Amino acid sequence: MLNIHDILETITMIEDEKLDIRTITMGISLLDCTDEDIQVSCRRVYDKVCKKAENLLKVGEDIEKEYGIPIINKRISVTPIAILKAAAKGDCVEYAKTMDKIADTVGVNFIGGYSALVQKGFTKGDLDLIASIPQALAQTKKVCSSVNIGSTRAGINLDAVKLMGQAILKTAELTAQEQCIGSAKLVVFCNAPDDNPFMAGAFHGIGEGEAVIHVGVSGPGVVRSAVEKAGDCSISELAEIIKKTAFKITRMGQLVASEASKRLGVPFGIVDLSLAPTPAVGDSVAHILEAMGLEKCGAHGTTAALAILNDAVKKGGVMASSRVGGLSGAFIPVTEDAGMIDAARCGALSIEKLEAMTAVCSVGLDMIIVPGDTTAEVLAAIIADEAAIGMINGKTTAVRLIPAIGKKVGEELFFGDLLGEGPVMKLNTNSPAKLIARGGQIPAPLHSLKN
């Protein structure tokens, strides 16, 4: 039974420490929406998703009011569109426009799944979708795109890496008048999970059911407050405090997911217990690391502190829910984290340090603004580096880079809302063009042979 202390603690977490449910995401299968005529296929997609998700917004708002828990985003993810495109003739961008129309009709913040899974090779549908990404993201507002170019089991598709370097640059160019925002809605994965509720990388995996409800929790501010209150304790005691705090955060996500599942009549999928920051003061993963004892995020010791944080969050979360999945850990998106923004601006945080940090956290090089004259080959090489970390370590890694067209190091882009803002970060511009041009498949590591 809850006592008065539990109730007051929860109120403090929500009102003062910015605890929230970051997203309720409904995943919907489109495998029965294929047709040779792309217009027929798009109508099937529109009708099915709108019917399945017609009450998603209302249910989220009702739960928010009844329980007093902020639910920031309501989102939809769908089967990778490249699978539908394999059967359809016509312009793949029609699917993106349909997805954008669905988002407006249903009232969700984002819709993900303009995606392809090409870790081991391409189908015609995959190639059509990848080629269409720049136009699709330039012509829509709420559509998010992702491409999985590698896995521990398959290795890395270097031809796909090359194409995605080109796609990121072209997308930024086509949305240059909108702060290059198209590239902020495009993620390149290694080991992409099928059940991720967070954008821009969410899609409904082909092994998932007809429809499912996933919930992504947040709470960097709650963890930071707990760390600050801990004082000068040992690192093992600090890890225990973080673990207990993550347990409390995840229990709230479990409650919301169960309620949403019951009211929508859709199976409960997973709770993603990732610490997802925002640009708001007090809602920063970087500030947690600094509360742990770093003068500034990016200082030597940052990777170790992040490893402790990520591990403790996972241990606490899995005790609170038997359905933990997605990415689940600590996110480090530069423009979406007030502490990361400050560290990047003052030069304490470099892209090389961020790459090291990605070896021990949830995702990868996320929401990083790079110079507008960066070549597609350099972008591709950054993707290859990050994918190699994911492949070798058997973890999900991702890249979301935003080339700031017309801007140089030190200048800034401003996206607003959850996407935030940040400085253009310096890159090593020595050319990797010959490496990227080799193409082919980077072989899977030996430890992928587990049978």
Image: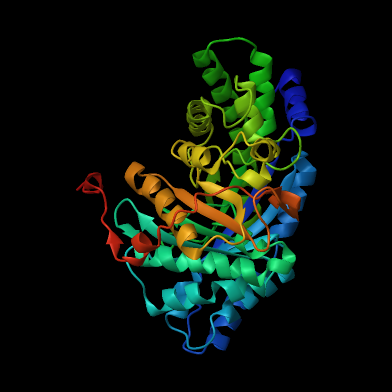
Task: State the scheme by which the image is colored.
Answer: rainbow
Q: Where residue 202 appears, x then y in whole percent?
A: 54, 57
- Relative depth, front residue between 349 and 29: 349
Q: Is residue 171 above or below residue 193?
A: below
Residue beneath the point at 73% across and 68% down: 177
- Relative depth, front residue between 334 and 10: 334
Q: Where residue 127 appears, x then y in whole percent?
A: 43, 76
Say left or right for 385 vs 420: left
Residue beneath the point at 35% across and 66% down: 437
Residue beneath the point at 50% across and 47% down: 326
Residue 210 appears in the picture as rendered: no
- Relative depth, front residue between 316 and 173: 173
Name the image quarter holding the N terminus: top right
Q: Is residue 207 above or below residue 449?
A: below
Say left or right for 115 vs 142: left
Q: Where residue 299 appears, x then y in whole percent?
A: 56, 28
